[in-house]
Each structure stands twice: as C-alpha cells, then as structure tokens.
Image (cartoon, grey):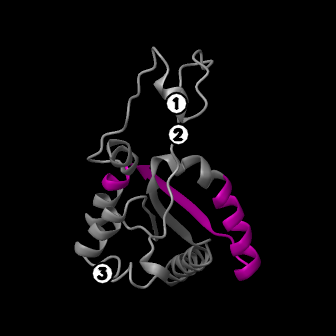
Amino acid sequence: MNKLFAASLLAAGLAFASAAQAAPTLLNVSYDVMRDFYKDYNSAFQKHWKAEKNEDVTVQMSFGGSSKQARSVIDGLPADVITMNMATDINALADNGELVPKDWVSRLPNNSAPFTSATVFIVRKGNPKALKDWPDLIKDGVEVIVPNPKTSGNGRYTYL
C-alpha cells in the first residue's frame, strides 16, 4: 500500500511539474476584421516572446464584432489582451467592471485613442464588378451591405 501511495505521489508530482513548465497561454479578444492581421502578428509576437523570455507562448484568439467582444469580456471572458476598434467599446470596459482605467484617454498623448480599424471589401467570387476602392462602391448595380452597427465598430463607422 505504501509503495502504491508513493508511486501515486511521484506521478502526481511529475504531472504537476510538467504542467507548471507548460508554455503560458494568452487570450486576445479582438474584432473580426483583425483576424488576418493577427495570423502574422501572433507569429512575430511568439518569436519576440521566445527571444525575450526564453520560453514559448501560446496565443489564442477570440473574434467577433467589437461591441459583442467587449460585452463578452464584461460578462467574464478571461481576456489577457483586448483589441477593440471603437472608443465606446473601451469605455464600456472601463464603466462595467473597471477592466480598463476610466481615465484611459487622458493617459495617452493628445487624448488619443490607441486603435485603428481596417475595412474589408468582400466581393463575389472572381470580383465580377472589379471593386477595388471606395469610389467603386457607387457604380451602377453595386449594393453595399454593412455589419450590424449595434455589435460592430465598422458597422458604426459605416452608419456615420
């Protein structure tokens, strides 16, 4: 019985030591259009982390409309990094649970907001109307569909 207990204790200790040395995992909660950006950026970040800390890091992603993602974090999604594209979403994080300092804007030079947003044109297969830039959107026969402005930062920008 003592040998079985000792073996079990040793196995548990080895399992714990193995888990303790596992690569850290970070969760970045972001908005949809950044999906392609983070494919490249995460790889570069992992190389930087390895060079700086001499350990691997796993980066997990959660994508969705910016406002929906902010709501998920407010409701408990355990984000390590949050990348939003609307000041209103950052304010929501500050106002609901103080996940971001309330004075986040005044902490930055010129009261700036640390975000950018990419707008993506999604076209039919083969791009039959040859849409490439903003002026192309007013061509005859072109219809613009935008994301829901209640859940998407880009939807809000488009609505404005």
Q: Earlier in the sequence, mark 2 or mark 3?
A: 3
Q: Please check the rendered image and state whether residue 55 is part of the magenta-colored stretch, yes or no.
A: yes
SS for dot 2:
loop
Q: Quadrant of residue 62?
A: bottom left
In this rendered view, identify the residue nearer to me: 112 or 120.
112
**Residue 76 seen in render:** no
In this rendered view, identify the residue nearer to me: 120 or 64.
120
Question: Which numbered tag is attached to residue 122?
Answer: 1
- Which residues are drawn in magenta? 40-68
**Residue 59 seen in render:** yes
Q: Quadrant of residue 107?
A: bottom left
SS for dot 3:
loop
Residue 88 vs 31, above or below: the answer is: below
Residue 69 vs 133, above or below: the answer is: below
Residue 74 in the image, given as x and y percentages of width and height: 27, 66
Residue 96 in the image, given as x and y percentages of width and height: 23, 72
In this rendered view, identify the residue nearer to me: 49 or 54.
49
Q: Earlier in the sequence, mark 3 or mark 1?
A: 3
Q: Residue at left 46%, top 71%? A: 80
- Tags 2 and 1 touching, CB below 8 Å: yes
Residue 127 vs 18, above or below: the answer is: above
Q: Amino acid at mark 2?
A: Val
Q: CA distance from mark 2 to mark 1?
A: 6 Å
Q: CA distance from mark 3 to mark 1?
A: 36 Å
Q: Which residue is mark 2?
A: 120
Residue 136 in the image, given as x and y percentages of width and height: 54, 27
- Tags 2 and 3 touching, CB below 8 Å: no
Q: Amino acid at mark 3?
A: Lys
Q: Amino acid at mark 1?
A: Ile
